[in-house]
Amino acid sequence: MSTSLTHPRPDVLAAIGATPLIRLRRASEETGCTILGKAEFLNPGLSVKDRAALAIVQDAEARGLIRPGGTIVEGTAGNTGIGLALVASVRGYRTLIVIPETQSEEKKQTLRLAGARLVEVPAVPFANPNNYVHVARRLAERLAATEAAGAFFADQFDNVANRRAHVEGTGPEIFAETGGRIDGFVCAAGTGGTLAGVAEALRARDPGVRIALSDPEGSALHAYYTTGTLKAEGSSITEGIGQGRVTGNLEGFRPDHSFRIPDGEALDIVFRLMREEGLSLGGSSGINVAGAIRLARELGPGHTIATILCDGAARYASKLFNPAFLTERGLPVPGWLSAPTDPLP
Ligand code: PMP
């Protein structure tokens, strides 16, 4: 996809991807490395998941799995649903989104405004048949049997069209933007599409590149990659990341390093990036940048490390930036967030 502004885009889908890689000043200065964040919050649906949504729908079209007027059904923490809703609007489909009720109101409202039908379900583990992914799969089967235009289950966790979006897009973009001078890549995993996809693309171009998982509390992947056993402990207020199983998108993938990041460490970074570098980001970006700083410390000064800035702060105003929410969870509230600012100098 071209980044030069020499021609109009045929539609908004052509504006997905080709996001800028931005140097994170403080993280770079503190580690002596060059730490770069890929600004995925600049995609049209405002998250990294636009890439997977587009790839999944294009793949379904190519395989004849979806018909005009048909319904795309997905279980999602929100961002994939937002991406699917916008792709569906352009390509002439409908969307039915199943979301755990614990996800932010901002994401649910965005989904409704994007035209998705929303089914909220209690947040229960994957092993429970009422987990949002299983509910979505069953709804897709039912709609496929009852609606004339049919239905398609996007299946982002196990559909490897998701990972391919990053093998063919995100990864090569990072390699090209750094002129091939990239020593490490780190990010969290929800479906694992971004992590495994970027890793595959970078390793194919430079087998020496170090790949790291940045895992939130409550996820089983850090234990899996360090001890061989899927084991989850604790919990996190971050959304869209953390995983209890080896998804289809993670199959065959192994990181070289793995970090378990507490929420407090990630949030401190989110707040600092907002106040000091003009970057308004969501919680998973904080987990990612925290992981990049840890990888920088392991590799030592002089290395170039990239990570993903997945989505923006506005999607979590009522949570990460709400003093009452933070206090309730025993997390520190930065002074500037609780104190009203004086409008006069
Ligand atoms: N951050 C956010 C905010 C997300 O919504 C997601 C996707 N659920 C991710 C990170 C993780 O991306 P992936 O599914 O490619 O692992």
Image (cartoon, helix red, strand yellow):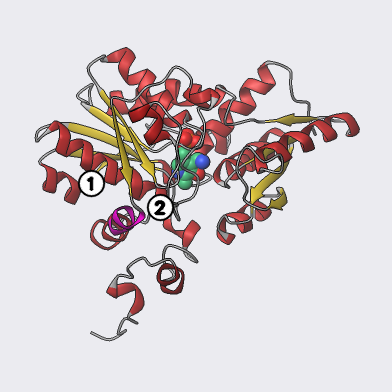
Marks 1/2: CA distance?
16 Å
**Residue 86: horizontal and vertical position, in percent?**
62, 42
Residue 262 visible in image: yes
Q: Quadrant of the N terminus?
A: top left
Quadrant position of residue 206: top left
Name the residue tied to disc 1.
24
Tell me if 253 is positioned left or right of 151 in this view. left
The amino acid pointed to by label 2 is Gly
Residue span colored magenta: 263-268
**Residue 115: horizontal and vertical position, in percent?**
70, 49
Q: Quadrant of the C terminus?
A: bottom left
Q: Is residue 255 above or below residue 342?
A: above
Name the residue tied to disc 2.
283
**Residue 167: horizontal and vertical position, in percent?**
43, 21
The amino acid pointed to by label 1 is Leu
Q: Secondary structure at mark 1?
A: loop
Tell me if 334 is positioned left or right of 145 in this view. left
Task: Please name the residue shown 80% across and 31% down the image.
Answer: 141
Is the residue marked by circle 2 packed among few (<14), some (14-19), or many (20+) residues within 10 Å? many
Disc 2: residue Cβ within 8 A of ligand 1's nearest atom = yes
